[in-house]
Image (cartoon, rainbow, N blue to C red):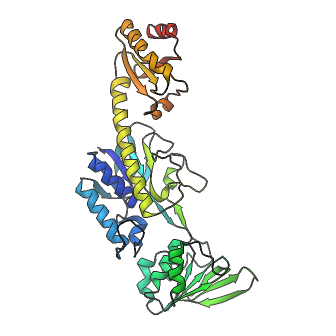
Amino acid sequence: MMANYDLIIIGGGPGGLAAGIYASRSKLNTLVIEKGTPGGQAATTEEMENYPGFFDGTSGPQLTEKMHQHASHFGCQFVKDEVTAVDFSGYEKVITTKKGSYTAKAVILATGAVPRELGLPGERELRGKGVSYCATCDADFYEDLDVVVVGNGDAAIEEAIYLTKFAEKVSIIVVHDEGVLDATKVIQERAFKNPKIHFVWNSVLESINGDGIVESVKVKNLKNGETWDLETNGVFIFVGTVPKTEFLQGVVDLDERGYIPANEQMETSVDGIYAVGDVRQKYLRQVVTAAADGAIAAVAAEKYLHEEENFRSEVLEQSRPVAVMFWSPFHQESMELVPKVEAAVTQAGNIGLVKIDTYRNQRIARRYGIEEIPTVVLFKAGEPAGRVNGADLTELAALLTQ
């Protein structure tokens, strides 16, 4: 028998943990499925200086462990497992993992992203043998040695600075002209002042070389086309991420890069499914934005569950016909029609009436293709049996007596 939850969160990074805090605090029966240690990529970041309130040397693992404890405190459950498939076609969503299956009425996708590979000769062959994508994980292996960092964004420059605590020299390969980095100004200034950091401008790597272990890299200057070998003991690559959405192909809409488009409520293309954090199509991927996504998604999911439960019990599961009126307090004609519809339903007899404010609940209106306000849809045995668009009371009376 599959374990059932109100909400399942796939992924235990900052977005998933924040969602777990908000959902469990709202008394939703919540499960977080995470194949590794909760914390996501943030748990591999040594210094966390841009999360509000944490500027005193708090590490990524420390911050995310506090989030984990916070969620657990309110009753959020955690299981260490890997999701292999999902079925979001029904009201009860099915999540299949390597160890079993679970069901939930709502799901938050917080699967995050993994470091992007350069695709260079020698990169995969020497991964774990001098090629790394995590300075926090591997920096101490390079005490008093030389390393190369590829990338020039915030992550690359921050990790390069961290590497200088261990390495003798850190060479950063930068594709831009001298002095131009994509990192924020404050991080740039710290890097430029660090005597252990050496910048290689207008350059890219062509290969990573070594016999069983990294020994050198081939560098190409983009201005003059010259190439040369740079001896190094390690290569750290920070050139963006790839979303972990392989198992979601054909399940929810993805953009051309594999990220999940979501609206401001974190809703995806499927009702009851939300996306948060690095896996979402967004402008800024940071711990603070992931946490915000998670909070929003949890609140939206709670509202969805409440609305769905009411709609199912008051409309879809009713044995008698139910007239559902879609209206809006901002639409004068629909407001004037409300008492007339109430009177018509009473006169018809043995018909229920449910009023849905489309301003507050656009989702159910979209589900049934409501394009005009007011609209009355008659449900029989949980299925739409007819509708009247507009305020024609004669048509409404005919609909209610059919």
Indicate the quadrant containing the N terminus: top left, top right, bottom left or bottom right: top left
Drawn side of residue 151 relative to residue 275, left or right: right
Front in this rendered view, residue 186 or 360: 186
Tell me if residue 363 comes above or below residue 10 in the rendering: above
In the displayed structure, would residue 330 be above or below residue 387? below
72 is higher (above) or lower (below) than 43: above
Which residue does the image show at 35% across and 58% down from the upper left? 17
Q: Nearer the viewer, residue 306 or 356?
A: 356
Residue 330 horizontal side relative to residue 381, left or right: right
Total label count?
A: 0
Spot the residue most to the right.
224
Give the vertical position of 265 relative to 217 (above or below): above
User: Residue 200 at what x, y percent from top left?
Assistant: 63, 84
> Who is closer to the viewer here, 131 or 340?
340
User: Quick check: can you spot residue 40?
Assistant: yes
Percent x, y of residue 28: 28, 45
Q: Quadrant of residue 32?
A: bottom left
Q: Position of residue 69 (x, y in %)?
A: 26, 62
Q: Residue at x 69, y 82 (%)?
A: 220
Q: Is residue 213 shown to the viewer in this render? A: no
Q: Position of residue 40 (x, y in %)?
A: 40, 64
- What residue is at 46 percent from the left and 24 percent from the top? 327
Quick check: 400 left or right of 250?
Answer: left
